[in-house]
Image: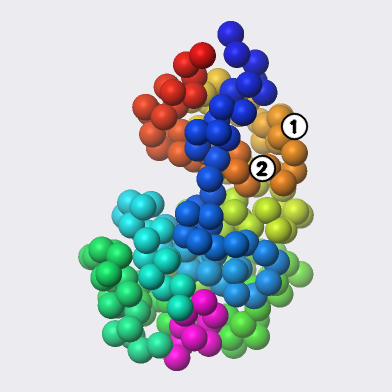
Amino acid sequence: MASQRDTVRKLLDLAGRTYAEEAGIKLADKPSPLYRLLVLSVLLSTRISADIAVAAARELRRYGTPRKMLDATWQDRVDALGRAHYVRYDESTATALGDGARLLLDKYRGDLRELREGDPRADLRDFPRLGPVGVDIFCREAQLVWPELRPYLDRKTLDGAKRVGLPEDPNKLAGLVRGDELVRLSAALVRVALDKKLAEQVREG
């Protein structure tokens, strides 16, 4: 039987790419990459496939600051979402992205790092279309550059841990990897929570 650390290694090898990496975001504690992560989190919050949401984030990369997002027309945003086949939610999401950019500029001077001084999980809820799921997505990924969030292993990640026979306790899970690997572990656990075949692959041998 594979040890827990062996399972984690296999999990990271098979599914440890973060959503930010897939969207072409080189995450850093800087305004633009954090804003692009916020946009990605909004896109992933709707009932649409992760692949389409990631593709939409790539299409929106030219609007990589809240000022650029706000300066883009509503139709520019709709068109970018359409190119990624982000349908059904394109018009409402285009509006939400504009409103969110305005909120970020007005309340935080365009810099999400200002959230770190308060309660990021509560304050993120103020952004349009970023409900509890979106906040979890943002925090899971942001823990790479905001270590005070660690270990951010929410219910979805713990469901994945259970599926592959790993501890369901966040601190025990976190003890199986280095701190900077937690973001990859959380992404991988979400994937196995959503993909039964992938979970079976991890459990095999």
Residue at left 68%, top 42%? 181
Name the quadrant containing residue 174. top right
Write down the residue under mark 1: 175
Q: Residue 157, can we see it?
A: no
Dot 1: within a 10 Å radius of its alpha carbon, few (fewer than 14), some, or many (20 or more) residues? few
Name the quadrant containing residue 56. bottom left
Write down the residue under mark 2: 182
Residue at left 72%, top 46%? 180
Residue at mark 2 to residue at mark 1: CA–CA distance: 9 Å
Q: Position of residue 112 (x, y in %)?
A: 64, 73
Q: Does residue 107 show up magenta in the picture?
A: no
Q: Position of residue 92 (x, y in %)?
A: 31, 74
Amino acid beneath label 2:
Leu
Mark closer to the chain start, 2 or 1: 1
Q: Position of residue 64 (x, y in %)?
A: 52, 77
Residues in magenta, as a range: 63-71
Residue 29 vertical placement versus 198 (above, below):
below
